[in-house]
Image (tube, rainbow, N blue to C red):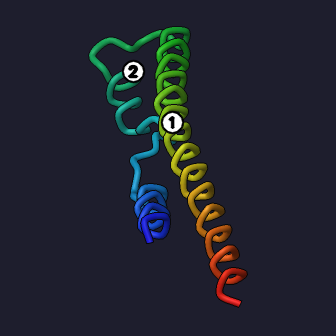
């Protein structure tokens, strides 16, 4: 029963909503770099967007590592639960 509860908890962790970072806000980029009082050079825009994308990548990577760990734990407990069921079935008959 504990294995089943563990699988349920880890599965909820897998399916729990996450805030993935997928793209920079176009409105924010336009307001900050293009429509600012003083236009920003394209090189600075490229640099800042590259840094932003890298930080987003690192943040998403951390979320994916947690996601992977939860899946591994849930799979391990499910496998253990099935093995216990098989042993219980053999002992019964």
What is the distance, in whole Å, between disc 1 and disc 2 at their CAs?
25 Å
Q: Is residue 45 above or below residue 84?
A: above
* Residue positioned 44% across, 72% down in the render: 1
Q: Secondary structure at mark 1?
A: helix
Compared across the picture, whether 25 is left or right of 83 comes to left
In this view of the protein, which residue sits in the foreground, 2 or 53? 2
Q: Nearer the viewer, residue 10 or 87?
A: 87
Mark 1, residue position: 60
Q: Position of residue 91 (x, y in %)?
A: 67, 81
Number of residues whose C-alpha sits closer than 10 Å to that of mark 1, classed few (under 14), some (14–19) or many (20 or more)? some
| Quarter of the image that includes the C terminus | bottom right
Look at 65% across and 71% down and name the residue there. 82
Location of residue 85 by image quarter = bottom right
Which of marks 2 and 1 precedes in the sequence?
Answer: 2
In the picture as drawn, the residue positioned furthest to the left comes out as 37
Residue beneath disc 2: 33
- Dot 2: within a 10 Å radius of its alpha carbon, few (fewer than 14), some, or many (20 or more) residues? some
Residue 2, quarter of picture: bottom left
Q: Which mark is residue 87?
A: none
Pinpoint residue 44: horizontal percent, then vertical percent: 49, 9
Secondary structure under tag 2 reads: helix
- Using residue 89 as the reference point, say whether residue 15 is left or right of it: left
Asked if the residues shown at circle 1 and circle 2 are in contact, with their CB atoms under 8 angstroms apart, the answer is no
Q: Is residue 93 above or below residue 39?
A: below
**Is 44 above or below relative to 29?**
above
Image position, residue 89 (x, y; %): 67, 83
């Amino acid at each position: 029963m504990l294995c089943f509860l563990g699988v349920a908890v880890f599965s909820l962790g897998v399916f729990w909503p996450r805030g993935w970072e997928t793209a920079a806000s176009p409105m924010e980029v336009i307001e900050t770099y293009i429509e600012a009082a003083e236009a920003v050079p394209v090189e600075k825009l490229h640099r800042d967007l590259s840094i932003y994308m890298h930080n987003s990548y690192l943040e998403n990577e951390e979320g994916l590592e947690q996601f992977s760990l939860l899946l591994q734990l849930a799979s391990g407990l499910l496998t253990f639960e099935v093995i216990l069921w098989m042993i219980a079935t053999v002992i019964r008959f």
